[in-house]
Image (cartoon, rainbow, N blue to C red):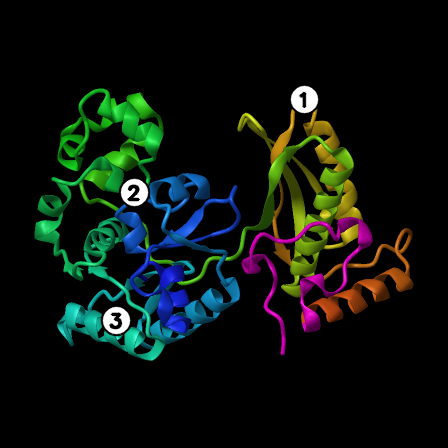
Amino acid sequence: MNTFFVSCERLVNSELNGIPLIIGGGERGVVASCSYEARKFGVRSAMPIQMALRLCPQAKVMKGDMELYSNLSHDITQIIQEKAPVVEKASIDEFYLDITGMDRFYGSYKWTDELAQRITKETGLPLTFALSINKTVSKIGTGEGKQKQNLDIPEHRVQSFLNPLSIQKIPMVGEKTFQLLSRIGIRTIKTLSEMPADALQQMIGKNGLELWKKANGIDHTPVEPYTERKSISTEHTFSQDTIDIPKLNRVLLGMVEKLSYQLRSEQWLTSTVTVKIRYSNFDTETKQCRVQYTSADHILTKTVQELFDKLYQRRMRLRLIGVRFSGLVRGTYQIDLFNDTEEMLALYQAMDRMKTRYGFDAVMRCAGASFKPNNKDEILKRKK
């Protein structure tokens, strides 16, 4: 989908059309999405909001409505699933379709173009697609076709399409890899594809061979129709760096309460807890531990606070803290006959019903009430 968050906002407010628009949260947050008008000034996703406003001071900044985006993403997904034989939802606004064999009966490009037109007609949202032999080339092609045209890249044209492009167009090439390869004169995919694979592997490690394959248009990764959730997490960036321990503990408590509610709502149990901190100098540290499968606030809160106490050893202000629950399995919380009470479980159930009906922040523990999720994506959809 083209600038998905921006397009969603413009769908409900036409006054936003044609102006530089940035979707992101707070002055210390980052750009979640931006319009093409803002990109002309150098604004990019994941850029700090303050830097984006220095590049484009006339831009309008909006926090965004993740509930709106999720609902529209769901509508798009349903339209695609009705037609496509195999669909992988890579993110809220990105999909891979395997339509192998469609060319024998209907024509792959014609079929995809008609699907794209239907999506735009029914949702009002623009999109771009690229048709090719694998996921890597299709993804690069979609990026190249943005705001220009949809691309059809058959096998015999793959290498000629890739060769003139910057190595930064390859999905797995980050800034460090780009700088490393640039220093030895490798800046285009053509140069990278002609480099010996073993030499590339010695230079950048185990990913060297995979990078060489992608530069040569080789990618055997299948389109996977369903991927089970692996973790849930949340982070909080402070408006001002802080060393206030009670405040940090309150925010952590709110995070745990929010994530635990999400676990129970989606019927997950977690076995691994991770705490993350980022100091004012941007040094980032994490610590994790295993726990018995659970979704109970009181167990996870104690674990998170213990991890935080072990992790936060430097007397330096913190910029960010985060909590992640991973190692998920399906299930519901089982009562501990020795430590739990019926009253406590009844309290959890009552609070969860109120949160589900009136929203996450309808009822919270007093100590954790100072934590407010940074965006609506972190609050489960409210039932009307």
Q: Which residue is mark 1?
A: 314
Instruction: Count how many numbered circles sit on residues in the image.
Output: 3
Q: Look at the numbered disc 2 and give the secondary structure of its residue.
A: loop
Q: Residues within 10 Å of mark 2 (few under 14, many from 20)?
A: few
Looking at the picture, tell me which residue is in the foreground, 55 or 243. 55
Labels 2 & 1 near each other (Cβ < 8 A): no
Looking at the picture, tell me which residue is in the foreground, 200 or 10. 10
Q: Which residue is mark 2?
A: 42
Mark 2: amino acid: Gly
- Residue 333 in percent (x, y) is at 75, 59
Q: CA distance from mark 1 to mark 3?
A: 53 Å
Span highlighted in magenta in the image: 357-384
Q: Is residue 179 visible?
A: yes
Could you tell me which quadrant the C terminus lies in? bottom right
Q: Which residue is mark 3?
A: 116
Between disc 1 and disc 3, whose residue precedes?
Answer: 3
Picture layout, residue 184 above or below residue 350 = above
**Residue 309 drawn in magenta:** no
Is 263 left, or right, of 157 in this rendering?
right
Q: Residues within 10 Å of mark 3 (few under 14, many from 20)?
A: many
Q: Quadrant of residue 261?
A: bottom right
Between disc 2 and disc 1, whose residue precedes?
Answer: 2
Is 226 left, or right, of 121 in this rendering?
right
Residue at left offset 76%, top offset 50%: 368
Picture layout, residue 6 above or below residue 202 = below
Q: Look at the numbered disc 3 and give the secondary structure of its residue.
A: helix
Q: Look at the numbered disc 1 and give the secondary structure of its residue.
A: loop
Residue at left offset 27%, top offset 36%: 211
